[in-house]
Amino acid sequence: MLANMASSLIEHKRINSTLTKAKALKVFIEPLITKSKTDNVHNRRLCFSRLRNKIAVTELFDEVAKKIGDRPGGYTRIIKLGNRMGDNASMAMIEFVDYNEIYSQNNKTKKASKEKSPKEKSPKEESSKK
């Protein structure tokens, strides 16, 4: 089950699941992402033995590892979504941290606006000091 969920996460970059499964998936996939940072045959075979999906391993080593390569850890994020209607199970969305455009754009604009516009004094404040 975890191998299929990990393959889906690698393919779609985010999936919805129960909170318990998402936490288990995080423990399962983060060591695989760490192995994918160094691209050699041994690490590919180790990841293939866990994932059992050739396409997912290829995408993990080619796309995901290049985007997440400089991050020292914490490659995934779990966001709680509330409870499911039928059985009241707690739901969560698990996603790769660097693939979320919404958070990365907001952080860049906030940092840029803080750096560009420090507090400028109004003309009234300047004239009162003279």
Image: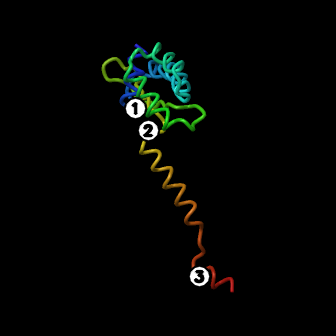
Q: Using a 10 Å C-alpha cutoff, classify the residue at mark 3 as few (fewer than 14 neighbours), some (14 to 19) or many (20 or more).
A: few
Residue at point 42%, 27% (across, down): 92
Question: Pointer 2: what residue?
Answer: 99
The amino acid type found where label 1 is placed reads Lys
- Element carrying mark 1: loop
Q: Mark 1 points at which residue?
A: 13
Q: Is mark 3 on a helix, strand or loop?
A: helix
Per the rendering, the mark at residue 124 is 3
Q: Point out the residue furthest to the left here.
A: 86
Q: Is residue 68 left or right of residue 18?
A: right
Between discs 1 and 3, the one toward the N terminus? 1
Q: Farthest residue toward the front? A: 41
Sequence-earlier tag: 2 or 1: 1
Please state which of residues 92 and 51 is positioned toward the viewer in this rendering.
Answer: 51
- The crowding category of the residue bearing disc 2, from other C-alpha atoms within 10 Å (few below 14, some 14 to 19, many at least 20), is some
Q: Quadrant of residue 57?
A: top left
**Residue occupying the point 44% across, 32% down:** 62
Determine the secondary structure under disc 2: helix
Residue 26 locus on image (x, y percent): 50, 23
Total marks in image: 3
Q: Distance between the residues labelled 3 and 2?
A: 46 Å
Q: Residue furthest right?
A: 130
Q: Earlier in the sequence, mark 3 or mark 2?
A: 2
Label 2 with label 1: CB-CB less than 8 Å:
yes
Residue type at the position of mark 3: Lys
Quadrant (top left/top right/bottom left/bottom right) for the N terminus: top left
x, y percentage for residue 15? 38, 28
